[in-house]
Amino acid sequence: MSAPSFKIETPKSLATIVAQRLREAIIDGEFALGAMIPEETLATSFGVSRTPVREALNQLQLLGLVSIRPQRGSYVFEASEADIAALCEFRFVMEPRAAELAWQHDRDATLQDLKAAVADMTAARKAKDAVRYSRADTRLHEAFVQHCGNPYLQAAYATAGAKIAALRTHLSAGTDVLHPRGYDQHKRLLELFEAGDFKAFEALMREHVMGTRDSYMATLKARNGAVRA
């Protein structure tokens, strides 16, 4: 006879709840890159003291979404060309291997998530909904890692995943939802995954991420040029 389970659901702390909401807001573009995050206003909006807000901001700083500047305040991270290049290099290494492991470890569930993400991208393109498209895009790429069965790969990706998702919304989603190239590449990645053709998958993923990198760089340069003007 098996022992009874006494596991209970631990209630989330206020700081965790605030951090989750702020994480969503930054990733979805409710705060601009580099924007100040007013602690007092947030505390009032959430109906909490400033303590859980500060704790939440500390959590988000660990994810790279927030920069806390002593005596100045908290700000949404600012993208740099070096950071974009480093994140894309990380993705070149991580995502193809995670996809291959997911195919071996949990193929059916991965395919189900990929197909759902592509369907949502299709609907988002029809509605010209950039945020919805970005969320679906993120779900597609994260599906490989979520189903890879390797906790170390998952932990490594989790560290960078929030910033990757935020950059996607802020620097490319508005264009991606209107143009077919990235969308078509996602559909092809799904097909190659289903076929188990990881040589072609890796080549296409590299092309896809390089295109993303170039798009981010171009958008960043245009924004910086507009600010200087």
Image (spheres, rainbow, N blue to C red):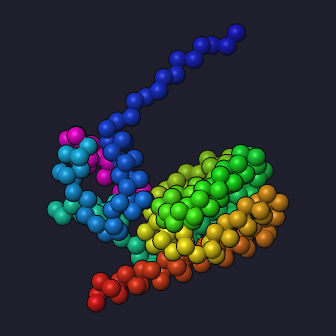
Is 202 within the magenta? no
In this view, 20 is above or below 86:
above
The percent position of residue 2, horizontal first and vertical second, equals: 67, 13
Report the magenta stretch's main SS.
helix
Instruction: Please give left or right for residue 181 compared with residue 107 in the image.
Output: left
Res. 34 visible in picture:
yes
Could you say which is closer to the camera, residue 212 or residue 95? 212
Does 57 lie within the magenta span? yes
**Which residue lies at the image location 19% right of the left edge and 52% below the top edge?**
41
For the N terminus, the quadrant is: top right
Q: Is residue 105 visible?
A: no
- Residue at 39% x, 47% y is 20
> Which stretch is magenta?
47-64
Q: On screen, 168 above or below 145?
A: below
Please identify the quarter of the rendering in which residue 176 is found.
bottom right
Image check: 115 left or right of 120? right
**Where does the image place residue 136, in percent across and percent down from the top left?**
57, 57
Q: The C terminus lies in which quarter of the figure?
A: bottom left
Q: Residue at x 83, y 60 (%)?
A: 195
Q: Quadrant of residue 201?
A: bottom right
